[in-house]
Image (cartoon, grey):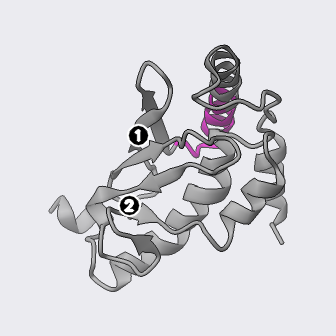
Amino acid sequence: MADEATRKTVSDIPVLKTNAGPRDRELWVQRLKEEYLALIKYVENNKKADNDWFRLESNKEGTKAKTSMVIKVSYINNFSFILKIPVTYPATAPEIAIPELDGKTAKMYRGGKICLTDHFKPLWARNVPKFGLAHLMALGLGPWLAVEIPDLITKGQIEHKSKSSS
């Protein structure tokens, strides 16, 4: 069960209506517009809550986003992650890879792909086509980072930001 703050965050992200993926040419353009509007709203909400933690860049087709995280929490270093949208999107949830963390946690697959199988993917499947990339960030990547990064720091797998800048 999600806590009240998570429910509020998700309820403030617009749901998407267009059930289209990269193979659906014209409908994909409409879906991308909805995706960008939801992401913009999510970023605006995060900034209002002093929780501005990522920047997003995409290729022209909107099928691959290389993202740089800008996380205000002092103990987290900046990582780049790659978000890949499958051709069967939105029926299939996107994958997120954090190459810098490859092999450092058991909750990650080869190539630095984070494990969202048990918790996020079933939620995604129940909410197709309403969920989009902003929902992936809020309900998939954000919670994964909140659990894994402190654990990796504790285990000495990555350095605390203040130590790495000394």
Residue 85 part of the magenta-drawn span? no
Q: Is residue 157 above or below residue 31?
A: below
State left or right for residue 116 relative to residue 64: right
Front position in the image: 89 or 105: 89
Name the amino acid type tagged 2.
Ile
Q: Does any portion of residue 161 appear in the rendered image?
A: no
Image coords of residue 166 (percent x, y): 14, 63
Name the amino acid type tagged 1.
Thr
Quarter of the image for residue 141 reads bottom right
Task: Check disc 2 and report its element: helix, strand or loop.
Answer: loop
Front position in the image: 40 or 47: 40
Q: Which residue is mark 2?
A: 76
| Residue interval drawn in magenta | 39-52
Sequence-first disc among 2 and 1: 1
- Which residue: 33% across, 86% down? 155
Image coords of residue 66 (percent x, y): 38, 38
Single out the residue that lies furthest toward the left.
Answer: 166
- Which residue: 56% across, 48% down? 94
Image coords of residue 80 (percent x, y): 34, 48
Q: Does any portion of residue 34 appear in the rendered image?
A: yes
Quarter of the image for residue 5 reads bottom right
Front position in the image: 104 or 125: 125
Single out the residue that lies furthest toward the front.
Answer: 23
State left or right for residue 44 relative to residue 65: right
Task: Check disc 1 and report its element: helix, strand or loop.
Answer: strand
